[in-house]
Amino acid sequence: MFLFKSNSTIFKDDYKKKIKDFVEENDDYKSNLVSEDTYEWNKFKVEDFKKLLHSYDSIESSEFSICNHQWKIRIYFYGKFKNDLDYFKFSLINTDRKNNYIPTKFVPYFKVSDSTETKNFPASLLYNFNNNACYEYKIYNNDYKSFMENINNDTQLCIGIYMRIYNNIIIEKYINDKLTFNDIEGTTFKKENSIYFEWAIKDWENIKSLRYFESPLFIKNNDKWSIIIKKGNIQLKCYSFSLNENHFHIKSIIGIRYSDNFSKGYLSEESNIYSKESEITFNKELTNIETQTKIDSIESIENVDTIIICVHIHEYSNIKENHINKLKNTLIEDDLRNINNIKRVDRNYFEYKIENISGFLNGVNKQSSEEFYVGNYKWKLHVMSYFNLICKEYNNINIVLENVDDFDNDEFVSCKYLFYFKSSNKHYPFKPTSSLTIFNNTKKKSDYFIINKNSYDKTIKSFIDNEDNSLTIGVYIFIYDNFIISNYFNEIKEKGIDNDYDIINSNYYEWEIEDWDKLQKENVAIISSPPFKIDKYDWNVTFYPKEENMNQVLYFSNNDSNNKDRNIFVRCIFVIRNCNDFSCYEIQKSKIESLEYNVELKSEVDKDGNNILSMKSLKSYEVSKRRLIENNKVIFGVFIFKMKKKKTKIKMKNSKKVKK
């Protein structure tokens, strides 16, 4: 609250004294006066101003300073000035960059230059300005027609304004006494901003019958709001928030007054909590402040020329949704950073609480969540604790995301996911966003997310809820459109076609190398994929980082001694792709081999006996100006085609029978 010493001004000019006396005679708040002053805009010849009255132009003064605030005057003309009820609109605009409340009254007036001859108009209602707020004032033809007719067309006309600024305790008392509502701040919601603004509507009798009427924007902390009158209802609309977050909610209440007496008027029922994306429509019924009776709608407010709609808003953040929104934004930012243009079709999160987390970690344990849905796909979360033989200690955690849909061969889901931890109101997004990942009937589980004891002690340990010894593990999932990825599959499948074989089915599996440089630094000689199963067969893919050329081998093993598939053949296509872009990939094909007990399928060499990709150049290898290895990550995949030979039709030549 800002308190000011009353500072009544003594004007030397008689016409200014008269205007002051005219306002002060009925001023109930003169004891709260802070400052007063006048400003005169020497702009027009009378003849030129009369021409403007019949135009559709608008004119605006330069910015001026009175009463320690910055202002502008703007005048709108509406092209006709014949009838007494024709008017032009006089607007006083506050242009301060920042302010809270400026309770203000003002009187527009006309004055003939080099003369004391003036015409002042009725005083405005006491109005609260904030930055960029304006008070629109209609001046009718019959208000000043006789004044304009009695002055010479060559005379210079001044447009003036007399202004009074009051202590803002007036507005604060009104808010505290009348515009209060139940505050919801607590464990779920946190109050971020409190906003108050007003909209003065002149000529209410004509305005209220309009089907749609919207206020100028009210701006505070870069929040932009407007008030809408629509079919007898009042609506609030938010155009932008200072914090661009979806987790913001608001509560609000509206008051309507038609005089400087704040104890008179009408009051709306407070709104329920709304998200920022909603338009808030208030009930048609408004309570009369004095009698507590109700009127059906604002259209029933009659016999007043000007009303002021007063809006009090509290903006809240939802503590839980705030955290979830940050996770969502982390995934969105990852897409933007990695130029992932695939359309997101769904998103959601799931949380799984582990009770007695200390007991869970001090042993070899596994817990699995119930099934949950994200994007019409079924998922489960698995959490495992284990004993690290190298470090010889517990408190090591594995987390796995599993898709549990029963997919056909050609069905899949593409997604990104982010693991996080939560305890009470603390949240921690532990794992960086995953790469763009495919789950299908072959790849059902994510790669293991391993948290060793050192990482546990530095991060998760502080999140344990000491009251109930619990820890919540969550995952946020983005689901992507399958169109681009289907094209990726189809392009590669075409490479597996051979005219001598029919394809029985095909399957795809992929896994990620998260730290390519580490393979080189640690001189790793062999890298193998996790084992995976197709039909009853076990498979894994191995490659050799130390070799000069990129050589990959698909190993197949079958322990079934009664193998009935000896007439079945397989071919594989090895894939190396960018972790965020399905159009950036290279392939290597194997030969077609018989599917027996054990088989090795190697990537074919070119006519010079060399593999297509060189290990040395793989780090800088580009496809369409994008590198295969990006952010030190790369995806290895393999298409496995199960095939059988086509039957060959043997043509028999006709032969003559030999008589015996």
Image (cartoon, rainbow, N blue to C red):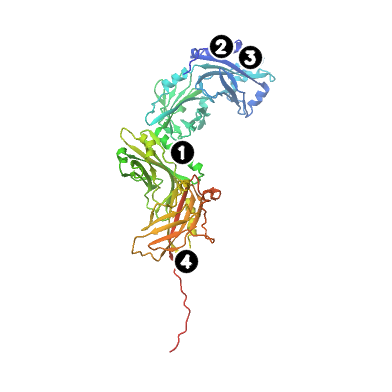
Looking at the image, is mark 3 or mark 4 nearer the viewer? 4
Earlier in the chain: of badge 3 and badge 4, it is 3
Residue 95 vs residue 649, the one in the foreground? 649
- Quarter where residue 143 is shown: top right
Q: Residues within 10 Å of mark 1 (few under 14, many from 20)?
A: few
Q: Residue at x 33, y 63 (%)?
A: 561
Going by the numbered disc 2, the residue's amino acid type is Thr
Q: Residue at x 46, y 74 (%)?
A: 650
- Which residue was labeled with disc 3? 117
- Which residue was labeled with disc 2? 9
- Cα distance, mark 1 to mark 2? 56 Å
- Direction from residue 67 to residue 505 in the image, left or right: left
Give percent across and percent down for residue 293. Answer: 39, 24
Earlier in the chain: of badge 1 and badge 2, it is 2
- Which residue was labeled with disc 4? 500
Going by the numbered disc 3, the residue's amino acid type is Glu
- Which residue was labeled with disc 1? 329
Going by the numbered disc 4, the residue's amino acid type is Asp
